């Protein structure tokens, strides 16, 4: 190959970090991605706070469950960071609010967590719609499995909230659920 042939490749589009970029990202989609990454980090901080709340109240199964969920949310944030880098973008870390640490009941924490998962799903749906509008198929393909997993998370939190409601604040029932969570039993019933 001659140097003339090579030179046509030297003006490839690059992102803000100077990395080669296959397809630029729509500006508003990129901003929404940065905000979504913050949502995942915020969920991680909230679940870490829940893990502490339960540890302080001897509910070690709930504490373990939320410690793992906190870690999972970090991984979600990292997955979004990886994706932005792969698209030649710079990851912008934003301020996180101090997580809430005061709760009146286990049910309140589980209801809050369920709503948090619902909000994350809505954010993913918004990203998907924006990606479709800007014909960004790399992004819709990236989001597909993520949305699948997120809907499973909603299902799981709805299940745990339901079990906590069944316990009706009775210590003995709550300790049974806590024991289940210690043993990693948090999946809803599966019929298929
Ligand atoms: Fe997440």
Image (cartoon, rainbow, N blue to C red):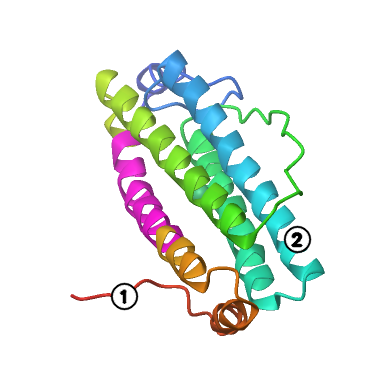
Badge 2 or badge 1: first in the primary sequence: 2
Residue labelled 1 has its Cβ within 8 Å of some atom of ligand 1: no
Q: Identify whether 75 is placed above or below 127.
A: below
Q: Number of labelled discs?
A: 2
In reply to whether residue 143 is colored magenta, the answer given is: yes
Visible residue check, residue 88: no
Visible residue check, residue 150: yes
In reply to whether residue 130 is colored magenta, the answer given is: no
Q: Residues within 10 Å of mark 1 (few under 14, many from 20)?
A: few
Residue labelled 2 has its Cβ within 8 Å of some atom of ligand 1: no
User: Where does the image place residue 142, in percent across and percent down from the top left?
Assistant: 36, 43
Residues rendered magenta in the picture: 139-157
Left or right relative to 58: residue 72:
left
Q: CA distance from mark 2 to mark 1?
A: 27 Å
Which element type, helix, strand or loop, lies under badge 1? loop
Residue appearing at x 32%, y 52% in the figure: 148
Q: Which mark is residue 189?
A: 1
For disc 2, the marked residue is 53
User: Where does the image place residue 91, in percent across and percent down from the top left?
Assistant: 61, 31
Nearest the eye: 73 or 7? 73
State the quadrant of the N terminus. top left
Nearest the eye: 166 or 72? 166
Nearest the eye: 120 or 146? 120
User: Where does the image place residue 133, in percent across and percent down from the top left?
Assistant: 26, 19
State the quadrant of the C terminus. bottom left
Left or right relative to 3: residue 108:
right
């Amino acid at each position: 190959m001659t140097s003339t042939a090579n030179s046509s490749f030297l003006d490839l589009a690059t992102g803000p970090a100077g990395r080669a970029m296959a397809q630029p990202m729509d500006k508003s989609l990129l901003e929404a991605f940065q905000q979504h990454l913050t949502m995942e980090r915020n969920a991680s901080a909230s679940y870490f706070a829940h893990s502490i709340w339960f540890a302080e109240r001897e509910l070690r199964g709930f504490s373990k469950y939320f410690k793992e969920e906190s870690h999972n949310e970090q991984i979600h944030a990292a997955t979004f960071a990886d994706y932005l880098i792969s698209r030649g973008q710079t990851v912008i870390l934003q301020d996180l609010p101090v997580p809430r640490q005061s709760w009146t009941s286990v049910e309140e924490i589980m209801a809050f967590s369920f709503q948090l998962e619902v909000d994350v799903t809505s954010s993913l749906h918004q990203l998907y719609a924006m990606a479709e509008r800007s014909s960004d198929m790399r992004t819709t393909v990236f989001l597909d499995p993520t949305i699948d997993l997120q809907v499973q998370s909603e299902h799981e939190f709805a299940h745990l909230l339901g079990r906590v409601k069944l316990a009706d604040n009775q210590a003995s029932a709550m300790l049974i659920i806590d024991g289940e969570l210690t043993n990693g039993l948090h999946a809803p019933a599966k019929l298929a």
